[in-house]
Image (cartoon, grey):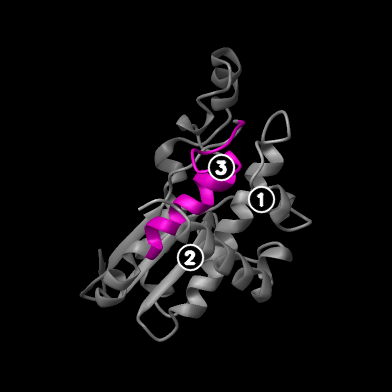
Amino acid sequence: FLDRGLPIHVLVNNAGLAGQRGLTDDGFELHFGVNHLGPFLFTTLLLDRIRESGPARIVNVASKAHFDAKAGIDYAVLRQSTPSLAGLPEYAVSKLANVLFTKELARRLEGTGVTTYALHPGVVATDVWRRIPAPVAWVMKRFMLSSEEGARTTLYCATDPALAGVSGRYYDDCRERNPSKPAQDPAAARELWQRSEAWIAELPA
């Protein structure tokens, strides 16, 4: 990507799942493990190289569902299988973690030339809904954005020159928005980082 003639290196964390139940192989609630710990591990493994590659951007695809995690993150239940039937409360917590991760990344990367962004892409007709029964999914997807439409805010955060001087913010429909109150708490962002760092340190090499 180019920003005023300069090459921009971009990492986009977009892999995830929704509406499923279970545990990861490492023993974390499925949504939290896949949607937060996976991107956290991947990003931190690349962080030295990303710093060296500045200017660079890290874009985390979150969701407006994070607003539903009004009580923040209950760390006591993250090592248990998904307790809800549809997994939606757990999905919301994992998306809150994405926004908090973005905020703490911005603090840790201040002054390095690496900036971070979290975003809501819209409700997009992708394979994230693959476990929903096919007839229901077919009806749902008729009211969702296409993959191309859903990529717009991600591409905006990854490439727009106007965002070069900002970091740690949340975007929706190519505009900056205020995230939920729990997502604005710097202490919560630091705690999530510290706990995540300790958890991945326990994983087998």
Quickly name the residue at label 3: 27
Residue 39 within the magenta-colored segment of the rendering: yes
**107 sits to left or right of 44:** right
Quickly name the residue at label 2: 117
For the record, the magenta segment spans: 21-44
Identity of the amino acid at label 1?
Val
**76 sits to left or right of 102:** right
Query: Which residue occupies the extreme right position in the image?
Result: 71
Identity of the amino acid at label 3?
Gly
Of residues 87 and 126, the one nearer the viewer is 87
Query: Which residue occupies the extreme bottom position in the image?
Result: 111
| Classed neighbour count for the residue bearing mark 2: other residues with Cα under 10 Å, few (<14), some (14–19), many (≥20) | many
Image depth: mark 2 or mark 3 in front: 3
Going from the N terminus, do you reach mark 3 or mark 1 first?
3
The residues tagged by marks 2 and 1 sit, at their Cα atoms, a distance apart of 18 Å
- For residue 18, above or below residue 13: above
Element type at marker 3?
loop
Image depth: mark 2 or mark 1 in front: 1
Residue 25: give x, y in percent of width and height.
49, 38
